[in-house]
Image (cartoon, rainbow, N blue to C red):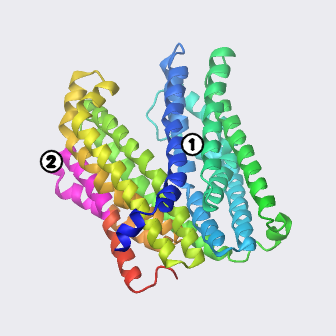
Amino acid sequence: MQLFQTLSNRDVHKQVLLLAIPMVLSNITVPLLGLVDAAVIGHLDHAWYLGGVALGSTMISVTFWLLGFLRMSTTGLAAQSYGAGSKHQLGLVFSQGMLMALGFATVFLLFHQLIADWVFSFSSASDQVKHYGQQYFSIRAWSAPAALANFVLLGWLLGTQNAKAPMWMVIIANVTNIALDVLFVIGFGWKVEGAALASVIADYTGMSFGLWCVWRKWHKDNLPPILGLIKDTTNGLSRFVKLNRDIFLRSLCLQMTFTFMTFQGASFGDEIVAANAVLMSFLMMISYGMDGFAYAMEAMVGKAIGAKDRQQLSDSLIGTFFWSLVICTLLTLVFAMFGSRLISVITDIQQVHAMALEYLPWLVAMPLVSMWCFLLDGIFIGATKGKEMRNSMFVSTCSFFAIFYFASDLGNHALWMAMLSFMAMRGITLGVVLFSQWRREQFLV
């Protein structure tokens, strides 16, 4: 009965879509930025410029991605404070997050050259590619304070149930990056330095807009003075640190599986690694779509838990699961009916197309299987239950490697079987914990 009442409630659907759609739209600009970067640098006179940018940007992206726990923890804690109506705690979450982000950025800037020298020493790329990769990395490193602060700004604004401001933050930063890419690289002829500088300026532009949005919210809700909050920053800091630690370990396991997927696929041959790259772009499509609903889940669940409102929590879960099911069913139908055509859009190499088509069934199954792990991640981030997320990811990662090991005779099919099982296990383990805590009325604690 409650299920049908919730699904017939327009306010629930409106709340979900108002939070999810802006985040999905902002996610769409991410692959567009990568495409423009490749197009601008790829039209220079030597291939090593593109290789250098790809190598340097990958290093930066992985480093910053591993510190993405700053956004997740801030979203959950801010949403709970917002739901509880605690202005002091809401302001405290922001000040703690920003101080931690700037602390990590300072450490990174102090040691970034040592990190670059160490990582590039393992690369088998040509001397020219490594030279331009280091050049890109050394400039891009200076965006660390803005990039990490943006995690906190995005998380805090989303936690206050505002998805439009984060959307515009991402769009403004990416459009700025694209425009400056063209100006610096093609207009001024600054090549790799121009591409790196464009990204640095874009990160600070996004941060400036985000700070302005926070300032408006701060004054509108009459939050406490920031200096007073900084003096009180140690209050509840241990919880913030533990949550960030658990989410970091979770992210490390996640990165391990995707890195293994790439390197193991490369060992199967050039055609297979190319086919896997094509299919991974499909997986990114799923991720871009589902992340928006996961973010909505984080904000709504955190608010409901802060308010200790079980009905609001239940409505949030039902509404978000419904729309996620709709999106994932559509993606499944698209992959099943038009998968071959989508592959043709990405590559016209006959061998790669045939290989990708062979492994396409794994991607057809992926949306409806992976949906649960994306949404349950959002639930547990909103509930700030980092330990459960960490343990779930550890079990799922072990299952990934175990399944690949026992099915390794199947070659690349074993790799995709392991990935599908990994996504399923993440959903199963978190689902069991949620069901158990919900029955014992421990989830709102």
Mark 1 surroundings: few (<14), some (14-19) or many (≥20) residues within 10 A: some
Residue positioned 32% across, 34% down in the render: 278
- Count of marks overlaid on the render: 2
Q: Is disc 1 placed on a helix, strand or loop?
A: helix
Q: Is residue 11 left or right of residue 318?
A: right
* The quarter of the displayed image where residue 177 is located: top right
Q: As displayed, is residue 342 above or below residue 292?
A: above
| Cα separation between marks 2 and 1 | 34 Å
Q: Which residue lies furthest to the top in this view?
A: 45
Q: As displayed, is residue 441 above or below residue 114?
A: below
Question: Identity of the amino acid at label 1?
Answer: Ile
Q: Is residue 16 magenta?
A: no
Mark 2 surroundings: few (<14), some (14-19) or many (≥20) residues within 10 A: few
Q: Is residue 406 magenta?
A: yes
Q: Earlier in the sequence, mark 2 or mark 1?
A: 1
> Could you say where residue 12 lies in the image, as x and y percent from the top left?
48, 62
Q: In which quarter of the image is the N terminus?
A: bottom left
> Could you say where residue 254 lies in the image, as x and y percent from the top left?
41, 56
Return the residue at label 2.
410
> Could you say where residue 380 lies in the image, as x and y percent from the top left?
47, 69
Q: Which of 436 and 68 is in front in this view?
A: 436
Residue positioned 30% across, 32% down in the render: 274
Q: Main secondary structure of the magenta part?
A: helix
Question: Identity of the amino acid at label 2?
Answer: Leu
Q: Which of 197 and 306 is in front in this view?
A: 306
Stretch in magenta: 398-425
* The quarter of the displayed image where residue 218 is located: bottom right
Return the residue at label 1.
60
* The quarter of the displayed image where residue 40 is located: top right
